[in-house]
Each structure stands twice: as structure tokens, then as C-alpha cells.
Image (cartoon, rainbow, N blue to C red):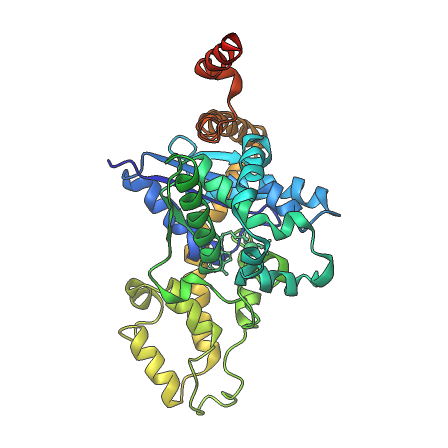
Amino acid sequence: MENKIILTGDRPTGRLHIGHYAGSLRRRVELQNSGEYKKIYIMIADAQALTDNIENPEKVRQNIIEVALDYISCGLDPEKSTLLIQSQISELCELTFYYMDLVTVARLQRNPTVKSEIQMRNFEASIPVGFFTYPISQAADITAFKATTVPVGDDQLPMIEQTREIVHKFNTVYAPVLVEPAALLSEQEACKRLPGTDGRAKMSKSLGNCIYLADTADEVRTKIMSMYTDPLHLQVSDPGHLEGNTVFTYLDAFCRQEHFERYLPDYANLDELKAHYQRGGLGDVKVKKFLNNIMQETLEPIRSRRKEWEKNIPAIYEILKKGSDAAREVAAETLSEVKSAMKINYFEDAELIRAQSEKYEEQ
Ligand code: ATP
Ligand code: MG
């Protein structure tokens, strides 16, 4: 095992959805079970969620447990991964404060994800400073645990880039204390930024275009059957288009060879299905039913594990507390190294006190 460390997380702004699953969660579980990582930290980013939910603290509070339930139901195992709540690690705020000196306003303004999020939230002239600077706080989260690897969707790439710049600057100006992280993206194009069921933006809790991991079987079926496909594909016999066709994007993300054997044996694989759709003669309903079968198969075990854990909520809070306590110790260690590199560790520096005494004795 090399010294590889993972840090990743989600904002408690709602239950997790299949975009999270495809973009990051599924991978996290594989990485957790691969045994290749020394440590895995999974963070519920409540402080970050508050930056654009200032009027809604109750929403953030309620969703901590939803996100934690989704984690555990997907197979994140508290024995193998440290599950923590961001706000409980006050060291992260201190790190953020010091990193702010290393970033310019112009650099933050260039961040394309923050730009589009500002637009989506209609912040324009009234952006909370905390929201504007959340990439810096994210750098604190990642570096506090000396993470080498951050599994994320591609909307997070600018944050990782920003973190790397902060690390580089810190290590150059002060001392080589921090570790430069790398993003780990899904290999499948469709999973890097799964679109919402409306086919417009990315699936996102804040946009209400999600299939949630905790949705009932009926809810999933209803959402799939009314999904956006190809507006030009009016009759079954019409040739269909794959570009921007959400149903096919989801098939790219979730369909495996064995699904054809089980649910659609007339076709050998996804390429054949796509070819038929493009030629014409294949109706949307048939494709949607196939997708529904796949999603039900994928989500059923998650749903039933969730039902079990929902009976034991105090145990989940206990897991989060234990994880946060453990994480805090690690963050405190990093903060202490950061402060000594920055020469703000006066009381631990016996040499400083000795030298200052000498200076005055000589006078
Ligand atoms: P919010 O709307 O509150 O920002 P969100 O749905 O965007 O919520 P986040 O908590 O911001 O979810 O994202 C958590 C992680 O999941 C990030 O790594 C992000 O890249 C990934 N992710 C979120 N949505 C998608 C998606 N549609 N496809 C792939 N990955 C995603
Ligand atoms: Mg987001």
C-alpha cells in the first residue's frame, strides 16, 4: 500500500442522487474495498452548504442524516472509511483563513464552476463572501487530510486545480508541508456529469431534476417514463438521435452486458440498440422500460439497506461523531505543521524565546 489518501464529500442540501452514484459514490466504494488507500475521508460539507443556504439552516441540518444514510446504503463502511461532518473540524476554518492570503480575487472570479453556480442561484451582485471563497475552504478540506486523491464529478475540477495552486504557493513560500492532490474522474464520459431527467443541466439537488437513491420503485419508474429523449423522434419509425438523449446517456452510465441477457435478449449490446434507434423502428417506451429495469436492479439493494439503517438513526450519529473526532486529530496535526511553517507557533518555539532573550541581554 502506498501512502495514498482519499478525501471527498457531498453537500447536505438534499438526498443523494444517481448523478452522485455514477460520478463519485460507486467509485468511492470500489476504492474503499480495493485496499490500496491508507486512509479514506468522506466529508459531509455542511459549512459549505450554508454558504448558499444561509436562510435555510434547518434544511442543512436535516440532510446530514440523509446523506449519511445514502453513504452507508451504497456500501461506504465506517470501519474502512472515516465519515465526518465538516463544521465539527474547526481547524478547517483556520486553514481557510491562512490560505486566503495565497489567492487573489481575480483568480477566484475566473473559476468557471463558481461563475455558473452564481448565475444559477441568481446571486449576481449579492454573492455571499463565503460562497465566493468556497474553493479556498475546499482546499483546506483536502489538504487538512493530506489527500492525494479526490474522486469527483467534472464540475469539481476547477476546485482541485485551485487547491493545487494553493499547495504549490504555500510550499514555495513557507515550507513543503502540504500535498498536491489529483482529481479522480470516472472513466466513462456519461458519468463525469450526469444530466438531469429534464435533459438540460447536470443532475443537481438544487435543480429538482434528480432520481434519488432513496426514491421508491414507483417514483423511479415514473421519472424514467417521463424523461427527456429526442424531440424529433415522434413516431416509432422515425430515426432517433443519441446526442443529448438523456435515456441513452443513462444507459451509457449504468448498462452492463449482462443487463441485455436479463432484460433485452433481442440485442447483443448497447451499440446494437443505439444503431436500431438511429435507424428508426425502436420506440422510446421500449428503451425506457429497459433503463427502468436496470435502475431498479441497481437501486434495490441500496434501498433495502437504507430501510434497515433507518431503524437505527442514533447509530449513524455515533458513526459521524466518531469519524469527526478522528478526523479532527489529523487536521490538528496538519494545522500545527502549517502554523510552524508560517512562523506563528510562538509558544512551541523554544529557540525563538531563547534568541529574543539573548538579543535583549546583549543590549
Ligand atoms: P448542489 O446542487 O447542492 O450543489 P449537487 O447535486 O451538485 O448539489 P454536490 O454535493 O455539490 O451535489 O456534489 C457532490 C459530488 O458529487 C461532487 O464530487 C460532484 O462532482 C458529484 N456530482 C454531483 N452531481 C453530479 C452529476 N450530475 N454527475 C456526476 N457527478 C456529480
Ligand atoms: Mg454541487
Quarter of the figure that contains the N terminus: top left
Q: Is residue 45 above or below residue 161?
A: above
Left or right relative to 25: residue 84: right
Q: Position of residue 26 (x, y in %)?
A: 39, 51
Q: Is residue 139 above or below residue 260?
A: above
Q: Position of residue 269 (x, y in %)?
A: 28, 72
**Residue lying farthest front?**
363
> Where on the picture, by quarter, is residue 313?
top right
> Where on the picture, by quarter, is residue 66?
top right
Q: Nearer the viewer, residue 261 or 165?
A: 165
Q: Nearer the viewer, residue 93 or 55?
A: 93
**Residue lying farthest top?**
361
Q: Nearer the viewer, residue 283 or 134?
A: 134
**Where on the image, by quarter, is ligand 2?**
bottom right
Residue 218 visible in this rendered orientation of the protein: no
Residue 200 visible in this rendered orientation of the protein: yes
Q: Is residue 228 above or below residue 173?
A: below
> Where on the picture, by quarter, is residue 145?
top left
Q: Position of residue 231 (x, y in %)?
A: 54, 85
**Residue lying farthest right?**
55
Q: Nearer the viewer, residue 104 or 279?
A: 104
State the count of labels: 0
Q: Position of residue 260 (x, y in %)?
A: 31, 68
Residue at image coords 42%, 52%: 24
Residue at image coords 26%, 74%: 268
Residue at image coords 59%, 54%: 105
Left or right relative to 291: residue 132: right
